Image (cartoon, rainbow, N blue to C red):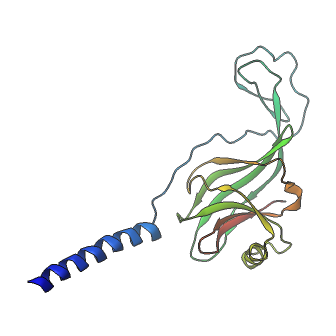
Amino acid sequence: MKSTVIGGIILAIFAGGGYWVYQYLNPEDVVVDEEIPTISESEQELPQGVLGMPDEDLEGDGVAVSLPADGQTPTAVELQTESAFQQGDSTYTIDGDLIVTQSGDGRSLAFADFSVTAGPDLFVYLVNTADTSNEGVKAAVEAGEFVNVATLKGNVGNQVYQVPAEIDLDDYTVVSVWCKQFGRNFGHAVIE
């Protein structure tokens, strides 16, 4: 009888532990739906006489203009670069576009129509490498040629990351979705 009880306890521990291992290795999708900056094709001057208008986005032939609700000066959003995400390590899938914008003194990384395999411990890394292949990105991260911008907000949907002012985006060539725990590149986009 005693061995049956112990066997039942061990079975319960393995079943519960198996569930947590499964959840850890097969996390659920986390969906994010942030507004991606709208950019027009070419630059132009900001529209005149727009102060005092209600909070809305105005688009001209060149830049998107957002009017703050408090009537302050509108901010132009300029496209810096746009590229498609490409697969990193072969066991993961990634899709979507990277859109790098500048507004005033700040730059942002927008992930548009984005999806990546769900995983634990995912971060957004800026990587400095001349070799933008998966192997090149991994080698650069292993050599410490990267900066951690943020924790990935979700593995599905539009999301925007502000590049901290102390980071010179011109020093980096790749944005990687990196699994810190396992040292894996889930995918990356080249900053052109």
108 lies left or right of 181: right
Residue sticking out furthest to the front: 2
Q: Residue at x 72, y 40 (%)?
A: 37
Residue 146 in percent (x, y) is at 78, 66
- Nearest the viewer among 186 and 82 is 186
Choose top left, top right, bottom left or bottom right for residue 54: top right
Residue sticking out furthest to the bottom: 3
Q: Residue at x 58, y 50 (%)?
A: 157
97 lies left or right of 47: left
Choose top left, top right, bottom left or bottom right for residue 121: bottom right
Image height of 21 relative to 177, above or below? below
**Image quarter in which the C terminus is found:** bottom right
Residue 67 in percent (x, y) is at 76, 24
Choose top left, top right, bottom left or bottom right for residue 57: top right
- Nearest the viewer among 8 and 71 is 8
Residue 46 in percent (x, y) is at 88, 27
Residue 44 in percent (x, y) is at 90, 32
Image height of 133 relative to 163, above or below? below
Q: Residue at x 45, y 59 (%)?
A: 28
- Counting every numbered tag in the picture gives 0
